[in-house]
Each structure stands twice: as C-alpha cells, then as structure tokens.
Image: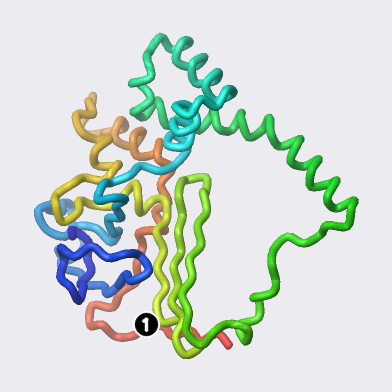
Amino acid sequence: THSWYEYSGGDAEARHPSEGETKPNYTGPKPPYERLHTDGKYSWLKSPRYDGEPMEVGPLSRMLVAYVSGQPRVKELVDGALAHLGVGPEALFSTLGRVAARGIETQVLSEKLEGWVGELANNMGRGELAIHDTSRWDPSTWPKECTGAGFHEAPRGALGHWVHIKNGEIANYQCIVPSTWNAGPRDAAGNRGPYEEALLETPVADPEQPIEILRTVHSFDPCMACGVHVVDSRRRSLREVRVQ
C-alpha cells in the first residue's frame, strides 16, 4: 500500500477489516515539507476496496443508486436539476454533481421528516419508548471471545466498525469511515482513490491560488480528523487509557 503502516503479511496483502492491522510506520520526509512522492508511502489513510475496486461514498453515491433504481422523487429532482443546467446525467460525476446531490438529498429528507416525526410521536403515544436493544448492553453478558460489526450510512457516506473481543477485552478494533473510502491513497496495484481520480485534468486558472482543487476536494465534505494520527518517532507510548 501507499499508507504509513506496516503489515505482518506485507504491503501487498489485502485484509478483511475484521482482521485489519494498524501499526504506524512513518517513512515520509521530516516535517516541515512541501512535497510527497506518490511512488512511495504518502498518507495516514488506508485504501479500502470493494471487490478490489475503489468506491466513492456519500450523497452523490446515494442519489445515483436511487436514480438508477427508479426512485420517483429523486428521479424528478435530478432530472429537473440537469434540465435547469442544460447538461446530461454524465455531468453528475463531478464537483457539480456532488454539490447538487447534497442539495437534492437534503430536499428529499426534509420532505420525509414530518412523516417520520409523526410516526415517532404515534409510537410514543402507544408507549413504545424503546430506542435500542439493551439486552446486551452490560459487558458481563458478552462471551469472553467474540467478534462484532456495525454499519451505518452516515451523511458523508458508508461507515463500518469491526471489533474482536478476547478474554473479555478489546483485542482489535477497526473502522472504515467515509473519508477513508474517498481520500485513501493508491492501493498496491496503483489504483487511485476518489479524491485523486476526481482531481485528474482539473483546470487551474491560477497555480498560485488553486481554488479549483479546493472546490473539488470540498465537494466530498472531507473529515480531516479521520486522517490525523499522534505518533512518537521513537515508538514510545504517549498515553494509555483504561476504561473499567
């Protein structure tokens, strides 16, 4: 991979997230620096793949799935936006498409909210107040060794968490967050992630102020905290937190 980690099976080995490893191994230049070379490792983000392919996640992905599956309201709004702009569906795969999809999704959700709130109020009126299953809330009810996974479609895109509990303690915990999907570096085969692919051939009017690059990256709604790591260069432990 092109990420600053080391793996027991080597950099080219692809692992399921439930068996993922996160062992920092910074090999980049000494900060401060102005340039990173993409032929080596250049990112703290990993490169998740689905069936071996990079995937873009977020509002555009959701609206495209709804559009091609024939969801009436989404199709109406997307077709209306395309007609207003005088472009075809191919224009959706762009900075414009991501921004438009976020607005369209917001409108679709706002139209649904009143009904959802009404259903919630009706349920509460009938005494249905449970919001989650608490039968496994107490860790003492868990097996000494087990695995679990949780998935959610967050505003930024697909989110997954995987946990391995051993001897009643967390032995491994891995997350793939939306910005990992979108902002990840090239994989071992050299395939670019969505950020890098979207920036190809982007015209820049003023190289000293490349605002067009910022617009494209901002259209993904990046979460930069997802790529921030605190690492001691001498591999000393910085903080240890134990939760009882």
Position of residue 150 measured from the top left corner of the image (x, y, whole percent): 51, 62
Q: Quadrant of the N terminus?
A: bottom left
Q: Looking at the image, is 193 positioned above or below residue 112?
A: below
Q: Looking at the image, is 158 positioned above or below residue 108?
A: below
Depth check, front residue: 101 or 231: 101
Depth check, front residue: 149 or 192: 149
The image quadrant of residue 197 is: top left
Circle 1: element type: loop
Q: Quadrant of the C terminus?
A: bottom right
Kind of residue at disc 1: Leu
Residue appearing at x 32%, y 69% in the figure:
20
Q: Residue furthest bottom?
A: 167
Residue appearing at x 40%, y 77% in the figure:
172
Residue assigned mark 1? 238
Position of residue 43 measured from the top left corner of the image (x, y, whole percent): 24, 58
Depth check, front residue: 67 or 1: 67
Depth check, front residue: 93 or 148: 148
